Image (cartoon, grey):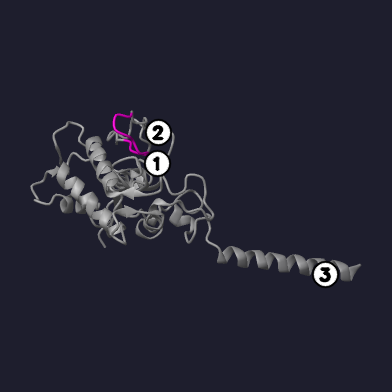
Amino acid sequence: MLALLKRSVLILACSTLCACASDEGAPSGGGPGLSGDERGDGHGSGAPRRLPNIFISPAGEPFRAAQEAPYPVVAWFRRADADHDGRLTRDEFRADALGFFGKLDMNNDGIIDGAELARYEQEVAPEILPKIESLHADEGMDPSLTFGDPRNTDNRPDDSRPHRRGEARAPAPARGIGVQGAAVYSLINAPEPVAAADTEFNGRITRAEFAAAADRRFDLLDKTSAGYLTEAALPKTPLQTAILKREKQAAKRRAEQPPVPPP
């Protein structure tokens, strides 16, 4: 009986040591490669996770910048504004989109096919795909950044699915539904902006379809029908809104800190 008791205690001790070793090897909080502190979601000490500095153009092209650099919507606008007059016209907007089409059309046949679309989603702009492994509810999006939320005053237009000429557009998502895919980083609500240009729903996106999608999106952004866009009048992306909010909170905390006494 005593031998059996000693054996049970030994097994329990070994199990405890194995569990501890497993906990040390796996990231806490469930996110791939993220500690609880980095997540900033209550699983750790609450330190906020660093936000990426990414913008995805209305055509779907990603622009990435260093953490402390200006939000890269600036880089896109100034490149697309070919004559650098501060006004992005329809022709410039369309030309910028078609330039990106050329980058995706690897074999130059005038069509983005399934393989080229997969390359876009997996290699060119992988940020638009959900991270499935160990995914927690609302991870990868901020559920407070919704198109129907009155706090989000930019009222970004919706282009989440293709529209035929004359067809009524779908309303923006209802309050409480988090933005998804490229919409997190974009001026319009299009979770997959390249695939959304496929108005024939045949898995093949022609150059003409891509140009038509660019014109449609220009109209969505040109709310006053001025015929051009300005950098100052662009709506903010949900990510950009989150970055600005975090910067304001950090500035407030710094201002509230007591002055350091002289040595």
Alpha-carbon span between mark 3 and mark 2: 60 Å
- Name the residue that disc number 1 marks: 179
Chain-order first, disc 2 or disc 1 = 2
- SS of the residue at dot 2? loop
Q: Is residue 236 visible?
A: no
Residue at 8% in and 47% down? 85
Residue type indicated by callout 1: Val
| Comparing labels 1 and 3, the label whose residue is closer to the camera | 1
Chain-order first, disc 3 or disc 2 = 3
Instruction: Provide residue 190's location: percent of width, then percent of height.
Output: 35, 42
Alpha-carbon span between mark 1 and mark 3: 55 Å
Q: Is residue 84 visible?
A: yes
Q: Magenta segment range?
A: 158-167
Instruction: Provide residue 117's location: percent of width, then percent of height.
Output: 38, 54
Instruction: Provide residue 19's location: percent of width, then percent of height.
Output: 65, 64
- SS of the residue at dot 1? loop
* Horizontal side of residue 38 vs 87, given as left or right: right
Residue type indicated by callout 3: Arg
Alpha-carbon span between mark 2 and mark 1: 8 Å
- Name the residue that disc number 3 marks: 7
What label does residue 173 carry, if any?
2
User: Split into 4 quadrants, where in the image is the C terminus?
Assistant: bottom left
Whether the residues at callouts 2 and 1 have beta carbons within 8 Å, the answer is yes
Mark 3 burial class by Cα count in 10 Å: few <14, some 14-19, many 20+: few
Based on the picture, tell me whether residue 112 belongs to the magenta stretch.
no
